[in-house]
Amino acid sequence: MDILDRDTARQLYKHFRKYRDGIRNEPEMASVCLICASIHVVPKVDDTRMRECRNCNFAFYRYECGACGATIDGRDPQNPGCSVCGLRVCTCGVCGCPTGEAQ
Ligand SMILES: [Zn+2]
Ligand SMILES: [Zn+2]
Ligand SMILES: [Zn+2]
């Protein structure tokens, strides 16, 4: 993974603080905390689908959709939470709930 420099992180932070749409499509946002702008964001120990900021402890979902492979980011308004399974809904409509095909 590329190391993100502080200036780039700042710019991304400023932009996505206002316009959260598209966070999921920005690979570098996996490493930028949207709360405190820290770049010390690491995979969460007890949940592989989450990442966690080591500076402010804010945790968010960021993982690949099992159905279509797109990145899902819990901070992106296009990935709303599912009230049933608690995971995030991909833009393809799949969340953690069993799909019709799997049954
Ligand atoms: Zn933070
Ligand atoms: Zn998907
Ligand atoms: Zn669900």
Image (tube, rainbow, N blue to C red):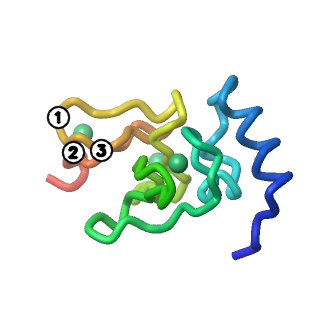
| Amino acid type, callout 2 | Cys
Classify residue 86 by image quadrant.
top left
Classify residue 100 by image quadrant.
top left
- Where 8 sits versus 76, above or below? below
Label 3 beta carbon less than 8 Å to ligand 3 = yes
| Amino acid type, callout 3 | Leu
Q: Secondary structure at mark 2?
A: loop
User: What distance separates the C-alpha of mark 2 from that of mark 3?
Assistant: 8 Å
- Asked if one can make out residue 64 in the rendered structure from this viewpoint, the answer is no
Label 1 beta carbon less than 8 Å to ligand 3 = yes
Residue under numbered circle 2: 97
- Tell me how many marks there are: 3
Q: Nearer the viewer, mark 2 or mark 3?
A: 3
Give percent across and percent down for residue 75. Answer: 50, 37
Marks 1 and 2: in contact by CB < 8 Å?
A: yes
Q: Residues within 10 Å of mark 2 (few under 14, many from 20)?
A: few
| Residue 87: mark | 3
User: What distance separates the C-alpha of mark 3 from that of mark 1?
Assistant: 8 Å
Q: Residues within 10 Å of mark 3 (few under 14, many from 20)?
A: some
Residue under numbered circle 1: 84
- Where 85 sits versus 48, above or below? above
Q: Nearer the viewer, residue 76 or 94?
A: 76
Label 2 beta carbon less than 8 Å to ligand 3 = yes
